[in-house]
Amino acid sequence: MPVRGMRERMNAPRFDAVRPGATIALIAPSSPFDGELYEKGRSILLEAGYRIAPGKSISNKRAYLAGTDVERAHDLMDAILDPEVQAVLCVRGGYGSGRLLPWLHFPNLRKHPKILIGHSDVTFLHLALISQAGWTTFHGPNLTGLAQSAQRARNVLDALSGTASYLWPLEDRQILRRGLARGPMAGGNLTCLAHLVGTPYLPDLTGALLLIEDCNEALYRLDRIMNHLKLAGILSGLGGVLLGEFTGCAEESEICSMVMEHVAPYDYPVVCGLPFGHGDRNDVIPLGAPFLLDTRNERTLRVLDPPVAS
């Protein structure tokens, strides 16, 4: 049975730390990738002491996809079901992971949760694994992004080792509406999330802290998506809204103003300028894990139950 509700996730599953010597699977669920960036990212993991298990079809290309849907889905399933693999890192986003969802056997995946890290188009997998398998997943840098920023690489290694704090202080300029909210984290790329509305793969976001980011989208397109979420009844049931980075979209002030127009009827806290998305930092954050957003006293966003044992 799908695990659609988010309210019941305040006791999220925990993972053992992925220590040097462990095996990390690399999969390409979306678009083809740059070979040089792949090798640089792979080298970072090897230098950190990890073993690498690339998917069998990882280098395949089919137009704008990294192989057929069946090939990419098999690589993902094989990585998750392999008892030697402790974590799965997506090589690149782009487009295509949403096409895998009909090919994934979620009842089986529910029995074999693994740390899965990725962002952008990987949002389709994050949301589907939360809704259909009850997983906690990790929104963060893809493999090809590790060599582009030392901060990104450190974020991923800290998440794997269980040393990530998952604590973010909030400045006054980031607080768009004050409040206190406790709930499971959900979200990712705004455009990808919107494409799951009306499908069985979008979790019930009632009570969730919705984290959204995007890249190279015009302001009116972001407006259209937010209006879509409002008309679909999603915005009204949230516990809070967290805006990450909107790279190449519009001025932050314009995006914040537009979002606040759409959430004006509700009273939950709203914050902006968080380091999640397509920027240089792109911190790792566990989706499905319980968080506290306090814009009154602590002025922090912090995890309530760390998902990886240190």
Image (cartoon, rainbow, N blue to C red):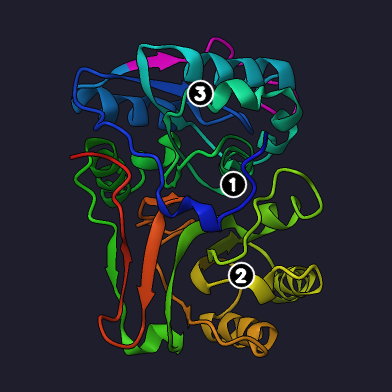
User: Is residue 247 placed above or below 283 in the rendered structure?
Assistant: below
In space, the residues marked 2 and 1 are separated at their CA atoms by 19 Å
Q: Splitting the image into 4 quarters, where does residue 260 fall?
A: bottom right
Question: Is label 3 or label 1 in front?
Answer: 3
The residues bearing labels 2 and 3 have C-alpha atoms spaced at a distance of 39 Å
Residue 298 rendering spot, x and y as whole percentages: 25, 80
Residue 58, position as x, y percentages in the image: 55, 18
Is residue 216 or residue 174 the one in the foreground? 174
Instruction: Describe the element under mark 3 as helix, strand or loop.
Output: loop
Residue at horizontal 28%, vertical 40%? 308
- Which mark is nearer the camera, 2 or 3? 3
Q: Which secondary structure, mark 1?
A: helix
On screen, residue 159 above or below 259: above
Instruction: Give the labeled residue for mark 2.
Output: 249
Tag of residue 100? none
Labels 3 and 1 touching (C-beta < 8 A): no
User: Which residue lies under the disc numbered 3?
Assistant: 111
Query: What amino acid does circle 3 point to?
Result: Lys
At horizontal 38% and vertical 88% (from top left) the residue drawn is 173
Among the two numbered marks 3 and 1 on one chain, the one whose residue lies closer to the N terminus: 3
Is 53 covered by the magenta stretch? Answer: yes
Viewer can see residue 64 = no
Q: In which quarter of the image is residue 72?
A: top right
Residue 123, label in figure? 1
Give, as a single range, the part of the protein colored magenta. 52-65
Q: Is residue 7 above or below residue 152?
A: below
Residue 53, percent from left and from top: 40, 14
Left of 167 or right of it: where is 236?
A: right
Label 2 crowd (10 A; few <14 / some 14-19 / many >=20): some
* Inter-mark Cα distance, 3 to 1: 21 Å
